[in-house]
Amino acid sequence: MDEVEKLLDAVYTGRERVTREEIHRHAVAVDAPAGVIDAVETLPEGEYAYDEASEALAQLAPPVITSGGVPAQALDDSDLSRELRHLHETRDDTFRHGSVQALANHDSRTAELEAEYLRRFPDRAVDPQRIRPD
């Protein structure tokens, strides 16, 4: 998923306008990539609607904001687990409030990371209480 879109989707949930400082604070809090934080820092001070912030960031740093994330195969085990946890934590918000593209990107990234996890850990512990009869 586009890192800037993911950031803006989270910041603007339930809000129409936010300040550059609020966007920056959130970017730092969620450990956004350095390039995204740098792009946010170049925004002029003031309040932005979602579309205004998205357009301004796209004009400031297009290469930074088109990142799809590190390929799942390149992540170490702890980073893979962290990425999966984050995706699962943000699923409901993305489903309820994300754009069609944000939801498609979320689905794609989740499938990529889950497939890699299952490839690495085919013998993971399965809770017998979660097994259904065929």
Image (cartoon, helix red, strand yellow):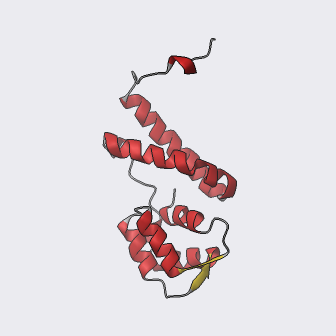
Q: Is residue 57 left or right of residue 94?
A: left
Q: Locate the C terminus and report the quarter of the image it occupies.
A: top right
Q: Is residue 39 left or right of residue 108?
A: left
Question: Which residue: 51% across, 76% down?
Answer: 22
Question: Which residue: 58% across, 45% down?
Answer: 107
Provide residue 28's location: percent of width, then percent of height.
Answer: 41, 68
Q: Is 36 placed above or below 89 here?
A: below
Provide residue 50's location: percent of width, then percent of height.
Answer: 62, 74
Provide residue 118's location: percent of width, then percent of height.
Answer: 43, 30
Provide residue 31's location: percent of width, then percent of height.
Answer: 40, 62
In this view, the residue farthest toward the bottom is 45
Q: Is 114 placed above or below 128 here?
A: below
Q: Is 126 placed above or below 70 here?
A: above
**Residue 64 visible within the image:** no
Q: Is residue 8 left or right of residue 77?
A: right
In this view, the residue farthest toward the left is 76
Question: Which residue: 47% across, 21% down?
Answer: 126
**Residue 107 visible within the image:** yes
Q: Quadrant of residue 77?
A: top left
